[in-house]
Amino acid sequence: MRRRAFGRAATGLLGLVLVAGLAGAQDAPSPEAIKAGAHTYASNCSPCHGARMQDPEGAFDLKTFPRGQRDRFFRSVRNGKNAMPPWGGVLSTEEIEGLWAYVSSGGG
C-alpha cells in the first residue's frame, strides 16, 4: 500500500514539474518577438532610455525592470509614468508586446 501511494505521489509531482517547465518555456519570448521589440525600442524608446536600455542621465534603467511584472510594464508604457509620457495612443498592443519581449529578454 505504501509503495502504491508513494508511486502516485511521485507521478503527481513529476507531472507538476513537467507542466511548470512547459509553462516557463511558453513564456519565453520568441526571437522574432525580441527582434520586433528591438526595432520598436530603437525607434521610440532609445532616445530617453539609451541604446542599451541604460540611460546615465536619469531615465529608468530598463535592464533592472522586474521580469515578473509584465502588467506593470504595460501600464507604464500605455499610461506613462513620472516623466515618461503615455504611449498607449502611439504604440499598438502588438508593439508593446514586442517591447516587453525585448526588455524581458535583457535586450536580445
Image (cartoon, rainbow, N blue to C red):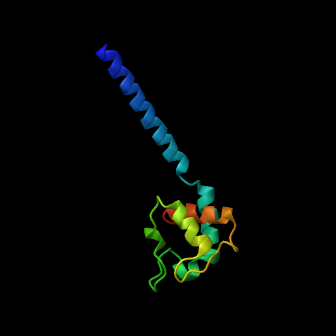
56 or 35, which lies in front?
A: 56
Instruction: Give the vertical position of 95 relative to 82 (above or below).
Output: above
40 or 8, which lies in front?
A: 8
Q: Where is residue 29 in the image (x, y as percent from the top left)?
A: 56, 55
Instruction: Give the vertical position of 44 relative to 94 (above or below).
Output: below
Instruction: Give the vertical position of 99 relative to 60 (above or below).
Output: above
- Res 17 → quadrant: top left
Q: Which residue is drawn at 55% across and 71% down?
A: 76
Q: Residue at x 46, y 58 (%)?
A: 68
Q: Residue at x 63, y 65 (%)?
A: 96
Q: Position of residue 94 (x, y in %)?
A: 67, 61
Q: Where is residue 45 in the image (x, y as percent from the top left)?
A: 59, 76
Regarding residue 95, the answer to whether it shows in the image is yes
Which residue sits furthest bottom?
A: 57
Regarding residue 108, the answer to whether it shows in the image is no
37 or 65, which lies in front?
A: 65
